[in-house]
Image (cartoon, helix red, strand yellow):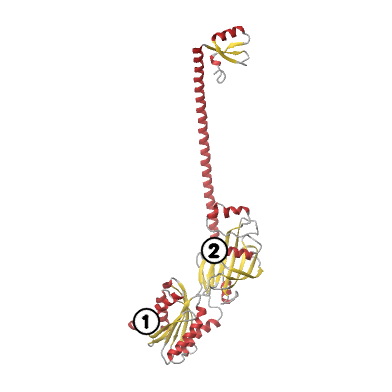
Amino acid sequence: MNRIQIKLALRLCVAFICLGAGIASSTGQQPAQSGLKTVDNPGGGQFVYGSLTGQFSKVDALVYMLHLVHNHFGDKPQLGKFLQSRDGSSLATFFTLNAKTLGGKPVAGLVIISMPDKGTPQAAVLYDDAKNFLSSEPSMMKSLTAAWQGSLGGTSKSAVSGGQAARSAQSSSGPPQLFPATGGDRSAMVKMPQSWQLLRVGGGGLVAEGDRGEMVMMGIIFQNIINPQNPQSQSLINGPMASRGAKVVCPLSENLFSDYVCVFNQTRRNNGKPQGSFNFTGLAPQAGGSQGVGHPVVARFTVDFNDGMGLRNGSVWISLMAPFNPRAESWAMIASMSNIPQKYGSAVDPTLKAVVESYTQDAAVIGREGAADLNRIHQQGVANQQQADEINTRRENSAKAYEAHRQQLNQNDAVNDSHNAEIDWQSKINQDYILDRSNIRTLDDTAHATTSNDLADLLVKSNPNKLEYIPNQQLIRGRDY
């Protein structure tokens, strides 16, 4: 939520609270409000405070204020523990919600109700963008305390102690309460605070973000990574396939962390996100697990994603999905990574650590998905084979049809040649008759000649042992005509 949206939300909150006074007077079941004020906190976030009138319990007043919050943001607040001051005069609870009136922005806040034995009941609502609330809440409480002291002409210990109780309860009780969360194909589950968001679940992996900017990416598989060291992969990089969608091109080396940084940053780039500036700080070999092969490693690092959150401390577990082969055409890895902005903690932050350690996979779901994938591959193989068989059948039928056609053409050529030869033979006989010519040959059939009838008769009679007439039926095409 940016500053302009925050100010707009504050103005809307003031208007709605004023409208809530009308609701209270008309129903007779809600406390009335008097002199509610809004403050834009210099340290971030906003708070609304003022007095309530009417003889109602702290719980009724708290429910009423939460009802106003619900109607204003368009989403029901998800509540944390109810916290009470030692003297029992004040009640408080943290809440989170997704502000539908602000485009689904995550909001976190605190509601405080104070009902001292003597004095006017007081109420306050503090809220900010969920990612900023933990850092802005202390300064808002300080500003609220000063505002209450000024408006009441002294100290309002009950009201102040309610906020302090909420803050101390959160800080002294260790990590906030974690709740199971899953989604997507429900193949993985993690326990996390209510203020966190689960972004994706699928294939045994999940992605979640915390309200302080924490990032958790567990069991994420990166596959179809093109290895430029393989000559055959060049066709995928520069050939016809190069234009078919965004690709991840990273060499496979023995330094799994540098390999991971290459793959992770290219994946962010392909998703339209800024790449991270990683700085390796340590590496520890790990024993092989149920996923991945070879020698998994855990790397510690700092990174800046250029998202305004500054440097982050993090760690990542990395393993290859197949035996190490630096000449493979493509390769795959699986990784589980978590990080937290340095201004909020280290990579061993108790909340972050608890979330990461709670991650589990549902082997049954993953098994069913794997079986479904294999079945799809099998069915695709059957379809591909059927298509190939149909193509081969069409090719064979086409070849047979072509051969039959070629033979028919050859047969037609033979008939046509025979017909043309008959015409040529008849033409030869007619020409010889018209021109008074005869055809003679040597007895050994080594020489043929066509000459006039008189010369032919003279030659045959003069050389009966060497020459003879050629009957018309023995004339040779290409030799005699």
Count the numbered circles shown.
2
Judge whether 80 appears above or below 323 on screen. below
Q: In the drawing, what numbered circle is on residue 18?
A: 1
Q: Tell me residue 43's x, y (percent).
A: 49, 81
Residue 292 appears left or right of 14: right
Q: Is residue 203 visible in this depiction of the protein?
A: no
Q: In which quarter of the image is residue 74?
A: bottom left
Helix, strand or loop under label 1: helix
Q: In the drawing, what numbered circle is on residue 260?
A: none
Depth order, front residue of 452/422? 452
Residue sitting at x 61%, y 64%: 260
Helix, strand or loop under label 2: helix
Residue sitting at x 40%, y 76%: 72
Q: Distance between the residues labelled 2 and 1?
A: 47 Å
Counting residues from the start of the chain, the first of labels 2 and 1 encountered is 1
Depth order, front residue of 86/271? 271
Q: Tell me residue 121's x, y (percent).
A: 41, 88
Q: Which amino acid does label 2 sit on?
A: Arg
Judge whether 307 appears above or below 462 on screen. below
Q: Tell me residue 256's x, y (percent).
A: 64, 64
Of the 4 image quadrants, the one containing the C terminus is top right
Judge whether 241 appears above or below 152 on screen. above
Q: Is residue 378 visible in this depiction of the protein?
A: yes
Q: Tell me residue 447's x, y (percent).
A: 61, 16
**Residue contact between numbered discs 2 and 1, judged by CB atoms under 8 Å:** no
Q: What residue type is labelled 1?
A: Cys
Q: Name the residue under label 2.
A: 269
Q: Which of marks 2 and 1 is in front?
A: 2
